Image (cartoon, grey):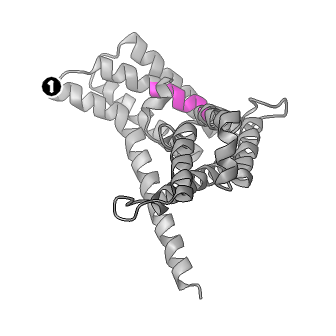
Amino acid sequence: MTNADLLPRRLSAQGAVAAGTKLKAHCAELQSRKIEIAPKLQAALNAVHAQTDVLAASPSSDASMNEIDRGADRCLSALDGQLEETIRAFDHEEILPLEAGEAELHDRAEKLRTALFPSGTGFVHLPYSRQWAAMKSVVTAIQAPENAPSIAALGLGVVTGRVVRWFDLYGDRLGITSAQKPDVTAQALDAWHKASGTLVVHARATFDGDDEASKSALNLLLSPYELQADSERQEEVRAKKAKKARAAKTP
């Protein structure tokens, strides 16, 4: 676990630049108020400022990595969803008892889901490098000999194979598992989130009082990320609703 895990949502590169730019303005306001900034907090702020500048000057966008990330997320979510649907298909056994074959599939789906996604799929919102590490655990479980019979019995060989391929592509694009030139914006975005996570730690440690001055200072330091994350979350919800509406209108 890293400090970046304290951030509940990964921002887009453009969103990180927007949040970082607003943070700089808020820091100027703190300075005008003559609020004392502890050395460790100042170092954390400097790191976020530096990574914001790197992202802002990046010659590319995070579109390619973002597309790979979305493809991997959808595949992982689909696999988890298939396992969940199998479990649900054999629900309410207290009313309609499971037959031998049904009980076997139910048990296999439950055990495999626990093995692959012990903590759910929330890791898809982590910074890229942290998500890759979580995906590695999924792939390790997929390739574990003890899970092969269940994958076969549930007919998930093709889907799990695709998850492995997404994992490989994800690592290649980040420059983790390949010597090919990585996506520099993706790496810079990861560094920005790590720096922002460290900022959260030191900001909360510095301004941990219940007085209004501490609360105000903490809000100035943390609100740029929080507001941007909420904005991107709402935009994602709107996009999903619009997609469903379009699909419903399609004959």
Q: Residue 52: name its quadrant.
A: top right
Q: Main secondary structure of the magenta part?
A: helix
Farthest residue toward the bottom? 251
Farthest residue toward the top? 39
Q: Residue 101: name its quadrant.
A: bottom right
| Residue for point 67% across, 37% down | 139
- Which residue is under mark 1? 211
Crowd around label 1: few <14 · some 14–19 · many ≥20 (10 Å): few
| Residue for point 59% across, 34% down | 134
Residue 182 rendering spot, x and y as whole percentages: 77, 35
Q: Give the range drawn in magenta.
A: 189-197
Q: Is mark 1 on a helix, strand or loop?
A: loop
Farthest residue toward the front? 100
| Residue for point 37% across, 61% down | 92
| Camera sees residue 11 | no
How many marks overall? 1
| Camera sees residue 39 | yes
